[in-house]
Image (spheres, helix red, strand yellow):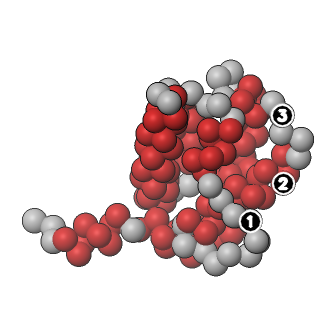
Amino acid sequence: MKDQTEDLDQSRAYRQLHETLGKDKIQAVVAGFYDLIKGHPTLGPYFSEVKDWDELKARIGHFWWIDLGGERYREDIYNPHAVHRYLNIPPDLIDDWLVLFSGHLYEHLPKDHADSWLARATKMAEWIRTDLQQHQEK
């Protein structure tokens, strides 16, 4: 039987990915993913107003770098809930995002690293889905 300390360590394993993967790899994974988003049939239209894809990729790459345990190197402030509300993304499209992100992670990372990053992304996605649902009801 696992003890609580082991469970906590596993739940925070994603916080070591910045060391394991490095900034360049995290940025490359994010950039490749947003290249997929552009042409995605259900997700792409929500990003149709993006003017500077390189900046978007750099910003989101930085967001993930910090979330995966890295030190801040940009002055950006992040509010994923507000961004997704602003884009009017329907809560059910979170599933499309997760499927696409999952496939991309497993294509570009070793399984254990993809597992860890995806577990974190899934938690975030559920928080965002809940937020979107609550704002739809208002």
Residue in view at x 65 percent, y 23 percent: 42
58 on left or right of 43: right
Residue 57 versus residue 69 in the image, above or below: above
Closer to the N terminus: mark 3 or mark 2?
A: 3
* Residue 70 found in image quarter: bottom right
Give SS at disc 3.
loop
Q: Give residue 76's mark.
A: 1
Taking depth in this image into account, of 34 and 91 the one nearest to the observer is 91
Q: Which residue is mark 3?
A: 49
135 on left or right of 52: left
Residue in view at x 44 percent, y 39 percent: 130
Give SS at disc 1.
loop
Residue in view at x 57 percent, y 35 percent: 97
Q: Which residue is mark 2?
A: 55
Image position, residue 22 (x, y; %) = 64, 71
Give SS at disc 2.
helix
